[in-house]
Image (cartoon, grey):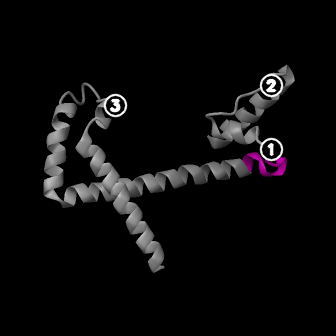
Amino acid sequence: LAKEQIIRAKQAKLDHEQKGIHMDSEGLLFRHIVNSDMPESERSEDRLAQEAQLVVGGGTVTTARTLTFVSYYILSIPEVQEKLRDELQGTMAPYPQSIPSWADLERLSYLQAIIKEGLRYLMLTLALMDGID
């Protein structure tokens, strides 16, 4: 999949160059790399596909670790779990017929506090573990 996107970005660059059109590189990682001043030898499809795997993998691992940590935090403290459940009841009442919007979830102050606190604890834990190694 990454290779296909890289090939498309390279082809789009060639098409635009042939037509004399400036191609905006904002918003798409591969389009940005293809249009960068990075040496051509570092922009091979295989190399960029490997880099894409690292980006996706890194994002997946850190997200999974964060969700695991925050879930444990919620489930290990019954008072936190109960207070969060109470706050979520109104917003989540129509689920699954209606999915709350991102804005609806952002308005839940206790949920936001839990997320921020979970991230803070996770970063502190990782920093302490890094010091132990």
Residue 81 on image: x %, y %: 17, 51
Q: Amino acid at mark 2?
A: Asp
Q: Amino acid at mark 3?
A: Ala
- Callout 1: few (<14), some (14-19), or many (20+) C-alpha neighbours within 10 Å? few
| Residue with the mark numbered 3 | 103
The disc placed on residue 37 is: 1
Tell me which segment is drawn in magenta. 37-46
- In the orientation shown, which residue stands out farthest toward the bottom? 132
Q: Amino acid at mark 1?
A: Asp
Residue 62 on image: x %, y %: 46, 56
Judged by depth in the image, the label closer to the viewer, 1 or 2, is 1
- Toward which corner of the image does residue 125 lie, by quadrant? bottom left
| Residue with the mark numbered 2 | 15
- Looking at the figure, which quarter contains the N terminus? top right
Earlier sequence position, callout 3 versus callout 1 = 1
- Toward which corner of the image does residue 17 lie, by quadrant? top right
Residue 17 against residue 31 in the figure, above or below: above
